[in-house]
Image (cartoon, rainbow, N blue to C red):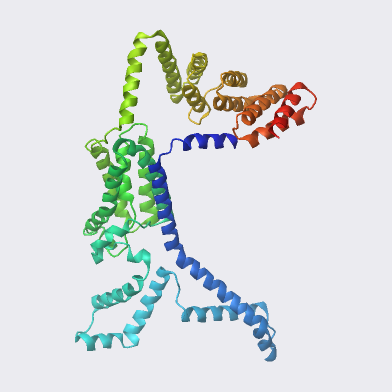
């Protein structure tokens, strides 16, 4: 847990203000979709609960006595039958809050009115035309639309058959399912972080929003074909096509290609199997826009680098030139090349070679004067992270941890000592490591509470030696 906390703390330092803005916007969009989708369901659930509560009250106060008065024993079977009758009657008098269920009811009600209650005759009187099935469907559609226009998820969605093209500006705010939203949230945030470095936030936002809005028009065009025409009356919403485009742009970077392809596949599968209907056209359009994004990214101009970035690049260039003339700088460059070679070997699965190179690289970094804190801490995170699989003994980890501590690299020391502790089987060595970690955390104000627990554990394991006395001294100074 402590390791996760420190890792999160380090990563938060890298988060920019624009990243926070995007995360907040995505969360807001999620809350908006959750509220608009779940509100009718929650209202209906409350109504069902109220039906049961009202019936139970009536049954306890009046129902039981009524059956006893007529000579019937109020059994559980009779109670259940009475409840079902009461519930059915209540629901007929009070329409469901769930829009889709209400639409089904309205179709039945409208057919009954049209055929048996004068609806057809009324139409003849008003229009002097005897209605056929096409007219019936048109009138039914108008009646249902008057109802659905009262609900946000219908009022904001784009329906190709209705050709209300102004709704393309609102349809992208909605998500067709929770699965689609989760895919959007995860891969959109990742794509933003990666592409913002290339384009800047403004260009990314312009491209994504432009495609999010116009994607409804592409879907509208597909419904003019014979295969997708059957879905012309369905609602379209979401940002799958825009997401596919930015994932395509991201895929040109080899490091991001697996993530981009995974995002596309998940999005297509969700549209085809989970959302279905009109989203099958989206599932077909998405790979096309993914490819278009992979092509377009080379044509979209990159953002201008800031003065700070230009200065940093100039400094790095001077350092590279200086390395060619300075033995010390050349040595440092060689050490970093050694580390890079080790990491590349680890990624290729060359465990033995990676272990050898990375051990040499860590030892070399530890011996530099002055020591490069950032380089050591970065290598520590790489070695203990999920992407590097190498076999290093617990003793080696502890030795590196002690060295890092002696060189005042406390963050690195904690990472290395914790890794060594997880492998150490010798109780005495493990206790010494607990003491070192606790001392660092308490004295250097790094997760102090965890450090106190470690020092207390050292004392509990043996309270009569020098190590215990030193641990008690540190805890006493804290008080």
Position in image of residue 145 (x %, y %)? 31, 72
Camera-side residue of 368 and 138: 368
Which residue shows up at 35% across the image and 66% down it? 154
Quadrant that contains the N terminus: top right
Camera-side residue of 298 and 132: 298
* Res. 197 visible in picture: yes
Which residue shows up at 21% across the image and 59% down it? 224
Q: Is residue 400 above or below residue 386?
A: above
* Res. 261 visible in picture: no
Position in image of residue 111 (x %, y %)? 34, 80
Which residue shows up at 38% across the image and 9% down it? 326
Q: Is residue 67 above or below residue 285?
A: below
Q: Is residue 394 left or right of residue 202?
A: right
Residue 29 image-quadrant placement: bottom left
Q: Is residue 294 left or right of residue 59?
A: left
Residue placed farthest to the bottom in the image?
70
Q: Is residue 204 above or below residue 137?
A: above
Residue 412 image-quadrant placement: top right
Quadrant that contains the C terminus: top right
Position in image of residue 422 (x %, y %)? 63, 28
Residue placed farthest to the right in the image?
464
Camera-side residue of 249 and 209: 209
Q: Is residue 34 left or right of residue 73?
A: left
């Amino acid at each position: 847990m402590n390791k996760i906390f420190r890792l999160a703390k380090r990563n938060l330092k890298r988060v920019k203000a624009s990243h926070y803005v995007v995360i907040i916007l995505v969360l807001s969009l999620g809350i908006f979709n959750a509220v608009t989708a779940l509100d009718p369901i929650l209202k209906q659930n409350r109504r069902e609960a109220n039906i049961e509560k009202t019936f139970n009250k009536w049954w306890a106060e009046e129902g039981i006595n009524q059956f006893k008065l007529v000579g019937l024993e109020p059994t559980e079977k009779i109670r259940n039958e009475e409840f079902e009758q009461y519930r059915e009657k209540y629901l007929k008098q009070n329409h469901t809050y769930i829009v889709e269920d209400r639409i089904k009811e309205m179709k039945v009600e409208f057919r009954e009115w049209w055929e048996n209650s004068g609806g057809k005759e009324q139409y003849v009187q008003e229009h002097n035309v005897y209605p056929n099935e096409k007219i019936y469907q048109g009138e039914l559609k108008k009646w249902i639309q008057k109802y659905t226009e009262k609900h946000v998820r219908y009022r904001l969605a784009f329906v190709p058959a209705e050709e209300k093209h102004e709704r393309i500006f609102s349809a992208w705010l909605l998500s067709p399912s929770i699965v689609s939203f989760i895919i959007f949230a995860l891969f959109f945030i990742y794509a933003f972080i990666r592409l913002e470095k290339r384009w800047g936030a403004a260009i990314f936002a312009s491209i994504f929003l432009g495609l999010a809005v116009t994607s409804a028009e592409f879907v509208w065009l597909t419904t003019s074909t014979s295969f997708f025409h059957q879905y012309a009356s369905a609602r379209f919403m979401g940002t799958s096509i825009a997401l596919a485009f930015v994932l395509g742009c991201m895929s040109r970077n080899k490091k991001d290609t697996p993530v981009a392809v995974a995002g596309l596949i998940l999005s297509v599968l969700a549209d085809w199997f989970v959302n279905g209907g009109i989203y099958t056209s989206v599932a077909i359009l998405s790979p096309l826009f993914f490819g278009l994004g992979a092509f377009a990214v080379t044509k979209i101009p990159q953002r201008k680098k800031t003065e700070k970035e230009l200065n940093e690049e100039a400094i790095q260039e001077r350092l590279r030139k200086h390395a060619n003339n300075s033995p010390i700088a050349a040595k440092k460059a060689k050490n970093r090349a050694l580390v890079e070679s080790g990491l590349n070997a680890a990624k290729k699965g060359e465990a033995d070679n990676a272990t050898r190179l990375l051990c040499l690289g860590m030892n070399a970094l530890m011996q530099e004067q002055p020591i490069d804190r950032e380089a050591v801490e970065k290598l520590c995170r790489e070695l203990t992270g999920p992407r590097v699989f190498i076999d290093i003994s617990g003793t080696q980890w502890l030795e590196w941890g002690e060295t890092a501590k002696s060189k005042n690299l406390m963050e690195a020391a904690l990472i290395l000592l914790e890794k060594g502790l997880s492998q150490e089987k010798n109780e005495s060595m493990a206790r010494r490591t607990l003491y070192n970690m606790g001392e660092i955390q308490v004295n250097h104000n790094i997760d102090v509470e965890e450090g106190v627990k470690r020092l207390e554990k050292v004392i509990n394991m043996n309270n009569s030696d020098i190590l215990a006395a030193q641990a008690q001294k540190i805890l006493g100074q804290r008080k």
